[in-house]
Image: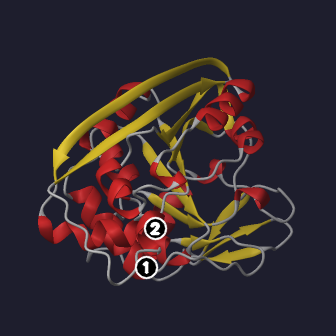
């Protein structure tokens, strides 16, 4: 028997983990129908694409993130500059079997974290281009175009939720987590990408950054909160500088005349861990 198509393989993974899904329109449980779509008892259905992902948006959505951005993001993450951060996250979710990555982009963080452990990772992002790339590169996980404001997931479905340098929906996180489950949110600290910030924003208010309000809101939203700062500096190959500029909002406003010279880059983040 030949290898499954990407659509069939994606459908099989979804069917194996079907209890995590709920119709984003009526909240009824979902079933995989003929390996081609997810469908609820009210006959709301969502096609599984030939690339193996499912689009569960209930209305059109626009994203400012392009295919080029996600390719750049993958190149930067694959270079290893986030390895130490991913190791810290892995330590925090060691016992989790079902992990949701919210705002997963092209899926590199989730795929790299899940590669070292048992269980299934499910990534959701409103940007179709990101999910397309995720499904293409990482078919071992489940990928979903969707919006947590109209969630395609059932309550108490996930042991851990990742939210890495991405907007959050804390009320939905609490609905989706099993009792005792945890949220891992990664937010920039003052030194994050400081070499780039210094060159782009020299002598302006944007040269400095504070995450104080974000951390405080997280503390108010979850119990048993732990805040761990992870900071280190790693070499950056010159050919990766354009990719770094492409993937970070800091680089989007660079003038054509600005000359950026980077030989190393600092990762400086707070890893926020909260439980329900």
Residue 247 visible in rendering: yes
Mark 2, secondary structure of its residue: helix
Q: Residues within 10 Å of mark 2 (few under 14, many from 20)?
A: many
Q: Residues within 10 Å of mark 1 (few under 14, many from 20)?
A: many
Residue 40 percent across, percent down from the top left: 77, 65
Residue matched to label 2: 10
Q: Nearer the viewer, residue 88 or 151?
A: 88
Q: Is residue 146 depicted above or below 80 in this figure?
A: below
Q: Do the numbered discs 2 and 1 sit on residues whose CB atoms are within 8 Å? A: yes
Which of the two labelled residues, at mark 2 and mark 1, occupies the earlier sequence position? Answer: 2
Q: Is residue 252 depicted above or below 276 in this figure?
A: below
Residue matched to label 1: 51
Q: Looking at the rendering, in which quadrant would you find the C terminus?
A: top right
**Measured Cα–Cα span from mark 2 to mark 1:** 8 Å
Q: Is residue 216 depicted above or below 138 in this figure?
A: above
What residue is drawn where x is 53% and y is 29%?
A: 272
Residue 52 visible in rendering: no
Residue 249 percent across, percent down from the top left: 48, 65
Is 175 left or right of 105, judged from the image as shown? right
Q: Looking at the rendering, in which quadrant would you find the N terminus?
A: bottom left
Is 244 left or right of 7, judged from the image as shown? left
């Amino acid at each position: 028997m030949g290898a499954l198509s990407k659509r069939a393989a994606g459908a099989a993974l979804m069917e194996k983990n079907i209890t995590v899904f709920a119709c984003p329109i009526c909240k009824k449980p979902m079933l995989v129908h003929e390996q081609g779509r997810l469908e609820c008892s009210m006959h709301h259905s969502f096609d599984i694409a030939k690339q193996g992902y499912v689009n569960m948006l209930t209305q059109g959505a626009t994203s400012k993130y392009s295919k080029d951005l996600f390719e750049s993001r993958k190149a930067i993450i694959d270079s290893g500059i986030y390895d130490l951060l991913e190791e810290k996250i892995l330590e925090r979710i060691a016992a989790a079997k079902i992990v949701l990555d919210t705002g997963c982009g092209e899926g590199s963080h989730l795929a790299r974290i899940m590669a070292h452990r048992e269980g299934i990772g499910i990534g959701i992002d409103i940007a179709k281009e990101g999910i397309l790339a995720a499904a293409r590169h990482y078919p071992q996980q489940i990928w979903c175009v969707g919006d947590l404001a109209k969630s395609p997931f059932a309550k108490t479905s996930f042991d851990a939720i990742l939210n890495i340098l991405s907007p959050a929906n804390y009320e939905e996180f609490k609905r989706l987590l099993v009792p005792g489950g945890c949220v891992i949110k990664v937010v920039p600290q003052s030194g994050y990408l400081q070499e780039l910030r210094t060159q782009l924003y020299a002598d302006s208010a944007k040269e400095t950054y504070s995450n104080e309000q974000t951390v405080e809101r997280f503390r108010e939203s979850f119990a048993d909160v732990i805040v761990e700062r992870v900071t280190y500096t790693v070499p950056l190959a010159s050919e990766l500088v354009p990719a770094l500029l492409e993937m970070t909002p800091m680089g989007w406003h660079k003038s054509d005349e600005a000359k950026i010279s980077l030989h190393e880059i600092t990762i400086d983040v707070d890893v926020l861990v909260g439980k329900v």
